Amino acid sequence: MNAESNEREKVADPAAADPATGGVTGADRELGSRAPQFIKASRTLHISWQVGVFVIGLAVVAAGIVMLPLPGPGWLVIFGGMAIWATEFVWAQLVLRWTKHKVTEAAQKALDPKVRRRNIILTTIGLVIIAVLVGIYVWKFGFAMPWKIDE
Protein backbone atom coordinates (compact mmCIF):
# COMPACT_ATOMS: atom_id res chain seq x y z
CA MET A 1 0.00 0.00 0.00
CA ASN A 2 1.30 3.43 -0.83
CA ALA A 3 0.42 6.82 0.60
CA GLU A 4 -1.91 7.60 -2.29
CA SER A 5 -4.15 4.58 -1.69
CA ASN A 6 -4.21 5.30 2.06
CA GLU A 7 -5.49 8.80 1.36
CA ARG A 8 -8.48 7.38 -0.52
CA GLU A 9 -9.51 5.33 2.49
CA LYS A 10 -9.64 8.30 4.85
CA VAL A 11 -13.13 9.45 5.75
CA ALA A 12 -13.75 13.10 4.98
CA ASP A 13 -15.24 15.50 7.49
CA PRO A 14 -18.97 15.86 6.62
CA ALA A 15 -18.92 19.61 7.32
CA ALA A 16 -16.14 20.06 4.78
CA ALA A 17 -17.82 17.86 2.17
CA ASP A 18 -19.81 20.55 0.39
CA PRO A 19 -19.22 24.15 1.40
CA ALA A 20 -21.95 25.38 -0.98
CA THR A 21 -24.66 23.66 1.07
CA GLY A 22 -23.18 24.46 4.46
CA GLY A 23 -21.88 20.97 5.09
CA VAL A 24 -25.13 19.18 4.21
CA THR A 25 -24.31 16.23 2.00
CA GLY A 26 -26.72 14.47 -0.34
CA ALA A 27 -27.31 11.69 2.18
CA ASP A 28 -28.15 14.17 4.96
CA ARG A 29 -30.55 16.25 2.89
CA GLU A 30 -34.17 16.18 3.97
CA LEU A 31 -36.48 13.85 2.08
CA GLY A 32 -39.69 15.10 0.54
CA SER A 33 -41.05 17.54 -1.99
CA ARG A 34 -38.85 20.29 -3.34
CA ALA A 35 -41.76 22.19 -4.88
CA PRO A 36 -41.85 25.96 -4.38
CA GLN A 37 -43.55 27.12 -1.19
CA PHE A 38 -46.52 28.76 -2.97
CA ILE A 39 -47.31 25.42 -4.64
CA LYS A 40 -47.12 23.53 -1.35
CA ALA A 41 -49.54 26.02 0.20
CA SER A 42 -52.47 24.81 -1.90
CA ARG A 43 -53.31 21.09 -1.78
CA THR A 44 -54.88 20.96 -5.25
CA LEU A 45 -51.99 22.89 -6.77
CA HIS A 46 -49.48 20.59 -5.06
CA ILE A 47 -51.31 17.45 -6.29
CA SER A 48 -51.37 18.92 -9.81
CA TRP A 49 -47.65 19.68 -9.52
CA GLN A 50 -46.92 16.11 -8.44
CA VAL A 51 -48.98 14.68 -11.30
CA GLY A 52 -47.09 16.90 -13.75
CA VAL A 53 -43.72 15.87 -12.32
CA PHE A 54 -44.75 12.20 -12.46
CA VAL A 55 -45.89 12.44 -16.09
CA ILE A 56 -42.73 14.27 -17.19
CA GLY A 57 -40.53 11.80 -15.28
CA LEU A 58 -42.46 8.89 -16.77
CA ALA A 59 -41.95 10.26 -20.29
CA VAL A 60 -38.20 10.63 -19.70
CA VAL A 61 -37.90 7.13 -18.17
CA ALA A 62 -39.92 5.66 -21.07
CA ALA A 63 -37.62 7.41 -23.56
CA GLY A 64 -34.64 5.92 -21.73
CA ILE A 65 -36.16 2.45 -21.87
CA VAL A 66 -36.70 2.86 -25.61
CA MET A 67 -33.05 3.94 -25.95
CA LEU A 68 -31.74 0.76 -24.29
CA PRO A 69 -31.96 -1.37 -27.47
CA LEU A 70 -31.74 1.65 -29.80
CA PRO A 71 -28.88 4.11 -30.16
CA GLY A 72 -28.78 6.59 -27.33
CA PRO A 73 -27.75 6.99 -23.71
CA GLY A 74 -30.53 4.81 -22.29
CA TRP A 75 -29.36 4.38 -18.70
CA LEU A 76 -28.36 8.02 -18.42
CA VAL A 77 -31.83 9.12 -19.53
CA ILE A 78 -33.50 6.65 -17.15
CA PHE A 79 -31.53 8.05 -14.22
CA GLY A 80 -32.43 11.55 -15.42
CA GLY A 81 -36.10 10.60 -15.20
CA MET A 82 -35.51 9.20 -11.73
CA ALA A 83 -33.89 12.52 -10.76
CA ILE A 84 -36.99 14.34 -12.00
CA TRP A 85 -39.16 12.07 -9.87
CA ALA A 86 -36.83 12.58 -6.92
CA THR A 87 -37.75 16.26 -6.83
CA GLU A 88 -41.19 15.23 -5.54
CA PHE A 89 -41.27 11.62 -4.40
CA VAL A 90 -39.45 10.10 -1.43
CA TRP A 91 -39.28 6.63 -2.99
CA ALA A 92 -37.35 8.03 -5.96
CA GLN A 93 -35.00 9.91 -3.61
CA LEU A 94 -34.29 6.67 -1.75
CA VAL A 95 -33.69 4.77 -5.01
CA LEU A 96 -31.25 7.46 -6.18
CA ARG A 97 -29.43 7.39 -2.82
CA TRP A 98 -29.08 3.61 -3.04
CA THR A 99 -27.87 3.86 -6.65
CA LYS A 100 -25.31 6.55 -5.81
CA HIS A 101 -24.07 4.42 -2.93
CA LYS A 102 -23.66 1.35 -5.15
CA VAL A 103 -21.91 3.34 -7.90
CA THR A 104 -19.52 4.81 -5.32
CA GLU A 105 -18.79 1.32 -3.98
CA ALA A 106 -18.11 0.02 -7.49
CA ALA A 107 -15.79 2.96 -8.22
CA GLN A 108 -13.85 2.27 -5.02
CA LYS A 109 -13.55 -1.42 -5.92
CA ALA A 110 -12.33 -0.48 -9.40
CA LEU A 111 -9.52 1.54 -7.83
CA ASP A 112 -8.26 -1.53 -5.96
CA PRO A 113 -4.98 -2.63 -7.60
CA LYS A 114 -5.90 -6.34 -7.46
CA VAL A 115 -9.22 -5.74 -9.23
CA ARG A 116 -7.58 -3.50 -11.85
CA ARG A 117 -4.89 -6.11 -12.52
CA ARG A 118 -7.54 -8.84 -12.87
CA ASN A 119 -9.62 -6.71 -15.26
CA ILE A 120 -6.58 -5.88 -17.39
CA ILE A 121 -5.62 -9.57 -17.58
CA LEU A 122 -9.16 -10.65 -18.50
CA THR A 123 -9.43 -7.93 -21.15
CA THR A 124 -6.08 -8.92 -22.64
CA ILE A 125 -7.09 -12.59 -22.77
CA GLY A 126 -10.40 -11.66 -24.42
CA LEU A 127 -8.67 -9.52 -27.04
CA VAL A 128 -6.16 -12.30 -27.79
CA ILE A 129 -9.01 -14.80 -28.26
CA ILE A 130 -10.83 -12.41 -30.61
CA ALA A 131 -7.62 -11.76 -32.58
CA VAL A 132 -7.00 -15.52 -32.95
CA LEU A 133 -10.57 -16.10 -34.14
CA VAL A 134 -10.33 -13.25 -36.67
CA GLY A 135 -6.96 -14.62 -37.83
CA ILE A 136 -8.45 -18.11 -38.32
CA TYR A 137 -11.38 -16.64 -40.26
CA VAL A 138 -9.11 -14.61 -42.55
CA TRP A 139 -6.75 -17.60 -43.06
CA LYS A 140 -9.65 -19.93 -43.92
CA PHE A 141 -11.91 -17.64 -45.99
CA GLY A 142 -9.62 -14.79 -46.98
CA PHE A 143 -10.45 -11.17 -46.47
CA ALA A 144 -14.03 -11.42 -47.72
CA MET A 145 -17.13 -10.27 -45.97
CA PRO A 146 -19.66 -13.00 -45.06
CA TRP A 147 -22.30 -11.33 -47.20
CA LYS A 148 -22.28 -10.76 -50.95
CA ILE A 149 -22.39 -7.22 -52.18
CA ASP A 150 -22.78 -7.14 -55.95
CA GLU A 151 -23.27 -3.73 -57.46
Image (cartoon, rainbow, N blue to C red):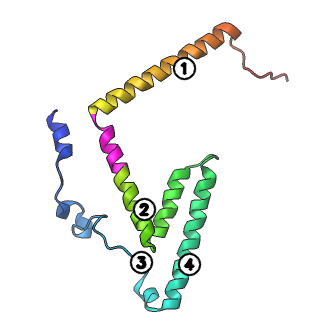
Q: Are marks 4 and 2 in contact (CB under 8 Å)?
A: no
Callout 2 environment at 10 Å: few (<14), some (14 to 19), or many (20+)? some
Callout 3 environment at 10 Å: few (<14), some (14 to 19), or many (20+)? some
Sequence order check: which comes first, mark 4 or mark 3? 3
Inspect the image, locate mark 2, and give the three-letter code of the amino acid beneath it.
Answer: Val
Sequence order check: which comes first, mark 1 or mark 2? 2
- Magenta residues span 103-112
Sequence order check: which comes first, mark 1 or mark 4? 4
Q: Tell me where residue 22 appears, x and y as whole percent.
A: 22, 70
Q: Residue furthest left?
A: 3
Callout 1 environment at 10 Å: few (<14), some (14 to 19), or many (20+)? few
Sequence order check: which comes first, mark 1 or mark 3? 3
Q: Are marks 4 and 3 in contact (CB under 8 Å)?
A: no
Residue 106 belongs to magenta span: yes
Inspect the image, locate mark 1, and give the three-letter code of the amino acid beneath it.
Answer: Ile
Sequence order check: which comes first, mark 2 or mark 3? 3
**Is the residue 103 above or below the residue 20 in the image?**
above
Q: Are marks 1 and 4 in contact (CB under 8 Å)?
A: no
Q: Disc 2 designates what residue?
A: 95
Which label belongs to residue 106? none
Q: Identify which residue is drawn at 52% across, 79% down.
A: 50
Q: Quadrant of residue 91?
A: bottom left
Q: Is residue 71 left or right of residue 28?
A: right
3D distance between C-alphas at marks 1 and 4: 51 Å
Q: Tell me where residue 30 appears, x and y as whole percent.
A: 32, 73
- Secondary structure mostly seen in magenta is helix
Q: Disc 3 designates what residue?
A: 33
Q: Disc 4 designates what residue?
A: 51
Q: Quadrant of residue 123?
A: top left
Q: Disc 1 designates what residue?
A: 130
Mark 1 residue element: helix
3D distance between C-alphas at marks 1 and 2: 38 Å
